[in-house]
Image: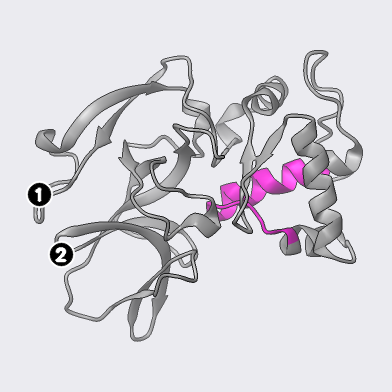
C-alpha cells in the first residue's frame, strides 16, 4: 500500500488530482509537519525519483493551477497550501495531523490567540503589556496548539517561506532539536531562526543568504521562547 494519501476523490467539490500530484501534496504536508518548512524542488525530486528539480516544478505548477497550493516566487521553499485543498483533506483525515505552514487569515473562531508585540528584555513574552490584540483562528491551521502569535519582522527566514508581516504560531518550549524553527530571545531582541546546537554552543541559522548565522557562546544571554508550529499570512504574495 502506498504511504501517500489519494486526494483525487476526496470530495465532489474538491479538485481532482493525479496520483503523482497527490503524492507531492502529501510530501509537502509531511515535510512541513516534520521540519516546519515545505520541501525544496530538489528534495521533492530526490524523494520521488525525478531526474531533475524541473520535473518537480512542473508538478507544483499543475497543483497551483488546480488551486491546492500557491507558489511564492524568490524562495526555494515557497510553497503555500491553499484553503480549498485543506478543506478537502480535512474531510477525510484527522485534522489534528495537518500542518499547513502557509494559510490565509480565516477560521471558524475556535481558538483565541494573543498577538505579541515588541518584547521587553527580562519580561515574560506573554506579559499583558506585550499583547496587541487577539485573533480567532481555526486550530487545524497548526501542527500543535500554539500559545500565541508573533509578528515576523524582516526577511531572514524567507527561504522557509516565512515573510515579513506573517503571523507565526508559537508553542512555548524550553528545548528544541536541531532543524526546528524556534523563537529565541537574545538579550533585548527576539528572533525567529532555525535551531542548531553544536559542541561550541548554539547556532541560530537564517534561511536567507543575505543574513549571517547567529552564534550563541556559553554564558551569553539566550532563552528559547518556543517552537514555530504554523503560519498565517495576512496578505497575499505579489
Q: Is residue 124 above or below residue 198?
A: above
Residue 176 lies in magenta, yes or no? no
- Kindly identify which numbered label has been placed on residue 187: 2
Read off the residue under disc 1.
123
> In this orientation, does residue 96 appear?
yes
Residue occupying image coordinates x 20% and y 59%:
189
| Percent x, y of residue 223 | 23, 62
Residue occupying image coordinates x 38% and y 37%:
146
* Quadrant location, the C terminus: top right
Q: Is residue 207 above or below residue 82?
A: below
| Percent x, y of residue 196 | 43, 71
- Kindly identify which numbered label has been placed on residue 180: none
Q: Residues within 10 Å of mark 2 (few under 14, many from 20)?
A: few
Residue 29 lies in magenta, yes or no? yes
Q: Nearer the viewer, residue 161 or 27?
A: 161
| Percent x, y of residue 26 | 74, 42
What is the chief secondary structure element of the magenta stretch? helix
Q: Report the magenta residues as a range.
A: 23-41
Residue occupying image coordinates x 33% and y 42%:
151
Describe residue 34's horizontal placement relative to residue 114 as left or right. right
C-alpha span from label 1 to label 2: 11 Å
Q: Classify residue 132 by image quadrant.
A: top left
Describe residue 165's horizontal placement relative to residue 10 as left or right. left
First of labels 1, 2 by sequence position: 1
Amino acid at each position: 500500500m502506498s504511504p501517500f494519501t489519494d486526494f483525487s476523490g476526496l470530495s465532489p467539490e474538491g479538485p481532482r488530482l493525479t496520483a503523482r500530484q497527490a503524492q507531492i501534496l502529501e510530501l509537502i504536508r509531511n515535510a512541513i509537519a516534520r521540519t516546519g518548512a515545505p520541501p525544496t524542488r530538489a528534495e521533492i525530486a530526490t524523494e520521488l525519483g525525478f531526474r531533475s528539480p524541473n520535473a518537480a516544478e512542473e508538478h507544483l505548477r499543475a497543483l497551483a493551477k488546480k488551486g491546492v497550493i500557491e507558489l511564492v516566487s524568490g524562495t526555494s521553499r515557497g510553497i503555500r497550501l491553499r484553503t480549498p485543498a485543506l478543506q478537502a483533506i480535512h474531510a477525510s483525515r484527522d485534522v489534528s495531523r495537518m500542518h499547513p505552514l502557509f494559510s490565509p487569515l480565516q477560521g471558524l473562531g475556535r481558538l483565541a490567540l494573543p498577538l505579541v508585540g515588541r518584547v521587553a528584555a527580562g519580561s515574560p513574552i506573554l506579559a499583558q503589556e506585550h499583547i496587541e490584540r487577539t485573533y480567532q483562528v481555526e486550530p487545524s491551521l497548526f501542527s500543535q496548539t500554539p500559545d500565541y502569535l508573533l509578528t515576523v519582522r524582516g526577511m531572514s527566514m524567507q527561504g522557509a517561506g516565512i515573510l515579513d508581516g506573517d503571523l507565526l504560531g508559537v508553542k512555548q518550549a524550553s528545548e528544541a532539536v536541531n532543524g526546528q524553527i524556534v523563537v529565541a530571545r537574545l538579550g533585548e531582541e527576539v528572533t525567529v531562526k532555525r535551531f542548531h546546537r553544536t559542541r561550541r554552543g548554539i547556532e541560530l541559522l537564517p534561511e536567507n543568504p543575505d543574513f549571517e548565522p547567529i552564534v550563541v557562546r556559553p554564558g551569553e544571554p539566550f532563552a528559547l521562547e518556543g517552537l514555530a508550529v504554523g503560519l498565517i499570512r495576512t496578505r497575499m504574495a505579489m
